[in-house]
Structure formats: structure tokens, C-alpha cells
Amino acid sequence: MEKITDYKLYDFLTLEDESIINDYLPILELLSPVTEILDPIHKSLGIVKVTPVRSLKFGEVFILRNLLTEGSGQSLIEAVGIVTKLPKETVLQFTIIPFYSIVNGIFTQLIEVDNMMQNELESEDEDIEMIEAQASERMSRFGIVNTIDNLAGGDILKWKAIQELPFMEVFTKLVMDKTKGDIMQDVRAIQERNRKNK
């Protein structure tokens, strides 16, 4: 490929020659993420801010993860709509370079969020009884709903409210709950050891 054409997104996604798309995608994946972009329709009105993933609502972060996992053109358009707060019709007016710069930023930030959650929320100690019951495998099919249900205290009527909370507030609450659980486990272990030593 000698020259890159900054196709309008709609034109790019509807190209009949799929080899062009396949040639472009590895290049587009190398674009640097952006935090702001010119409005594709009202360029004279200024800049559109790209909302950082950590600043989104809790539910939106997991919608983004699902959209990017799906990876279709439609799902990427929806994802860009979430972080730019622009309607689909406006997102379709982007050219591919700014569009994929936004997509790359979402990917990068979701990886950071996943790493943050894994580092802070995964338990180091394994409960033998839970392993024997294969509880985590059996519950894993419900994905993030497990966390939402736990935060809602099992009340389905509170699920929507949990999803509307800012991601970082929910994350902080999850880390706090895990820390409390770890402390209680340590206290029980100390108490058990003291009983045995008497």
C-alpha cells in the first residue's frame, strides 16, 4: 500500500473489496489513542471530548467490554458513541483515522481497567470448599451480574441503580469490601490459631 486514504467511516465499512479493509486494519490498530477530536459534522463548533473509561458509569464500562469483544463495525460505532456521547449518525461521519484512534484508546483503557480489577479484586487465597463445589466456574456464566447482584444485596430492583453509578465509585467499594473480607479472614485465622495454642 503506497498511500493511506482517510476514508469516511461509512464508506470504509461498506467497501466491496475486503482486502483493502484487511490491509488497513493492522495499520489502524497502531494509531495513538486520543482524548479529544474535532466534531465530524460541526467542525467549526470545536472539540468533542473522549470520556475516559474510568469516568464512565459502571454499567457502561461492561457494555464497552462486550462491544469491543464482539468487534463488529456496528459494535465499534456503539462503543465510540458511548465515550464521545455522539449519536450513531454523527459517529458515522468520522473518518477512519480519528475513529480508530478513539477505538484504540478504548481498548487500551479497558486493558488497564481489567488489570486494575484483577490486581485489586482477585483473591490470593483459595477456599478449598469453594473449589470442591466448583462455585466460581458455575457462577462465571453470569459475569458482571454476580458483582451487581452482590452490591445490590440480592435485590434485583437495585441492579439498574448500581449500573448507573460512576465506575470508580463502584470499584472503590469493591476494593473496600475485599479488604474487609481479607481482614476478617485473617482475624478468623488468628483466632483459630490462638484456640489451638491454648
Image: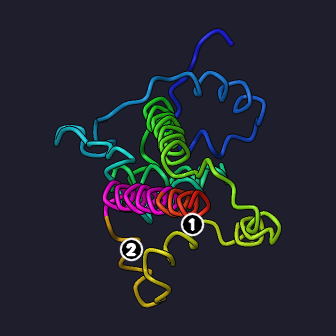
Q: Secondary structure at mark 2?
A: helix
Q: Observer-nearest residue: 82 or 171?
A: 171
Q: Decide if residue 86 is in sight here.
A: no
The amino acid sitting under disc 1 is Ile
Q: Quadrant of residue 131?
A: bottom right
Residue 27 position within the rendered picture, expressed as x and y whole percent measured from the top left: 62, 21
Q: Which residue is mark 1?
A: 144
Residue at figure coordinates x 42%, y 60% from the top left: 174
The amino acid sitting under disc 2 is Ile
Q: Quadrant of residue 134?
A: bottom right
Query: Callout 2: 10 Å neighbours few (<14), some, many (20+)?
Result: some
Residue 89 position within the rendered picture, expressed as x and y whole percent measured from the top left: 42, 57
Residue 83 position within the rendered picture, expressed as x and y whole percent measured from the top left: 38, 50
Residue lying farthest right? 132
- Our reading of the magenta stretch's main secondary structure is helix
Residue 163 lies, with reference to residue 114, above or below; the image says: below
Say whether residue 190 is magenta. no
- Taking 125 as reference, is 82 left or right? left
- Taking 62 as reference, is 141 left or right? right
Residue at figure coordinates x 48%, y 88% from the top left: 156
Residue at figure coordinates x 77%, y 36% from the top left: 18
Residue 107 position within the rendered picture, expressed as x and y whole percent measured from the top left: 53, 39
Question: Which label belongs to residue 162?
Answer: 2
Distance from disc 1 to disc 2, alpha carbons, whole Å, reads 11 Å
The answer to whether marks 1 and 2 mark residues whose Cβ atoms lie closer than 8 Å is no
- Magenta segment range? 166-186
Q: Decide if residue 193 is in sight here.
A: yes
